[in-house]
Image: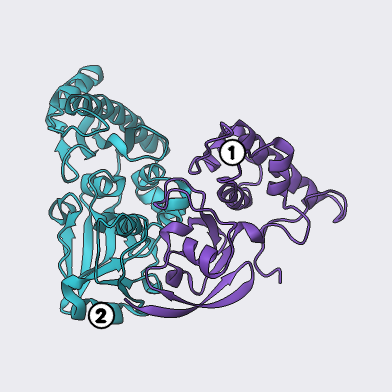
Amino acid sequence: MSEHEIRLTVNGVAHDVRVPARRLLSDCLRHDLGLTGTHVGCEHGVCGACTVLLDGRPVRSCLLLAVAAEGHEITTVEGLASDEQLSPVQQAFQDCHGLQCGFCTPGFLTTITAGLRANPGPTEAEAREMVAGNLCRCTGYQNIVAAVLRAADLTRSCNSGPPDAAEGCTIGEGTGAS
Amino acid sequence: MKPPPFDYSRPSSVDEALSVLASLGADAKVLAGGQSLVPLLSMRLAAPHHLVDINRLASLAYVRSDADAVRVGAIARHADVEADAEAARVQPLLRRALRLVAHPTIRNRGTTVGSLAHADPAAEMPAVLSVLGGTVRLAATAGTREVAAADFFAGPLESALRPGELAVEAVFPAAPPRSGSAVEEVARRHGDYAVCGVCAVVTLDDDRHIASVRAGYVSVAPTPLVLDLSDAVRGRAYDAALDAVRDAVDVEPEADIHATADYRRHLAGVLTVRAVQAAARDAAAREAAA
């Protein structure tokens, strides 16, 4: 069993860590780096709770080896807000009551953050498709879909208004913030 | 739900990868996107001694299209192939089928060639390669060989890949003039593996009658089954041809926890007719646009 010294860049911060080859990225984030915002549900790629952004694209961190993530920019849910300011997607989840127990929420937030970058003005059907790969056992999804649409509105008003005009104006880039 | 221990190497060139694979032989397993392999490891259904991660082989990240074919390199992600406008123009079935492969998040990491090498008869890409009569290029230190889809898929999760070989490219032939394609499938939930799926390719004759039909099947046989249904349509008017297609779908699926054999057989017939209808419409639309 091989061990590897790797440098992971998470939310713009470089971390040097020694991991066995078999360490999943989800476990590395949680156990080795203490970033427990990324939640682990099914551990075989079905539930979407562990979704993080790899170079800006959503991926399942439970289906990625930590050693294979070296050299990529990783964004976790901890990287979406800046300081005390919620990102538009986070603000929209609060506004729309898009979460109940919160277990699945980190995966939704990362998925939607990337989804709105690819499609800033989704229809309701596109919003539904955007979150189709994430499971939630509490909400029944209606408020999550509403939150996607609300987040799109918040992002638009942030981008068009003056910088200090609205709340929730941090676009959840995360990486490079520090 | 953690993978068993293994050794890991991450070659930075194709030559280095091939020599590592040659030295390890049957002990090695290639890691591309890992969207099928990592769950197999975590569920301890596979326990290779050594993973050879090919994700640094940037020279294999391509999607290249010309008049003859769409060529997909070993680490081109499903999402890259799906988004490639030229690939969608040269062979429209690719994008149509890729949209049914799991969820976008999985397609961001999973690779098209890896899906072929995994040889799951419940996956879409093996059926697409098979119905199109495509090939897979396999490289080893001794040289490369091209294997036709019909010879590549040997059984469930079994391919013609030998120890020491790396699947470096898949070749999806271009859609010929006057042809159309479609994919239809039924899954229990959005993004799940299909209970049954059908990829159909039809060509039209001078009078815009259906001249030939090929259908490739998902989750119906141990390997991606392809049926040539051209005899059923030849010389028949459209509606009669569709009835004949349905009768000609002679498949022997297995039962499992998701569906009985009879239900799968029923789906195969119904979905084939739907796919042939949609493919015929596609052919007519492409012809009109040409």
Q: Quadrant of the N terminus of chain B?
A: bottom left
The residue carrying pointer 1 sits among few (fewer than 14), some (14 to 19) or many (20 or more) residues within 10 Å by Cα, namely many
Q: Where B259 sits versus B192, above or below?
A: above
Image-based side of A94 in relation to A31, left or right: right
Q: Please give the label number shown on residue A127.
A: 1
Q: Quadrant of residue B206?
A: top left
Image-based side of B249 in relation to B282, left or right: left
* Residue B181 image offset from top left, x and y in percent: 31, 38
Q: Please give the label number shown on residue A136.
A: none
Q: Amino acid at mark 2?
A: Val
The residue carrying pointer 2 sits among few (fewer than 14), some (14 to 19) or many (20 or more) residues within 10 Å by Cα, namely some
- Counting every numbered tag in the picture gives 2
Q: Looking at the colours in the rendered structure, which chain would you say is drawn in purple?
A: A
Q: Residue at x 34, y 57 (%)?
A: B42
Marks 2/1: CA–CA distance? 45 Å
Q: Where B263 sits versus A48, above or below?
A: above
Q: Looking at the colours in the rendered structure, which chain would you say is drawn in cyan?
A: B
SS assignment at label 1 = helix
* Residue B98 image offset from top left, x and y in percent: 38, 46
* Residue B171 image offset from top left, x and y in percent: 27, 58
Q: Chain of mark 2?
A: B
Q: Amino acid at mark 1?
A: Ala
Q: Is residue B68 visible?
A: no
Of B243 and B193, the residue lying toward us: B193
Q: Residue at x 78, y 50 (%)?
A: A168
Q: Residue at x 34, y 30 (%)?
A: B278
Q: Chain of mark 1?
A: A
Q: Where B73 sits versus B112, above or below?
A: below
Q: Please give the label number shown on residue B20.
A: 2
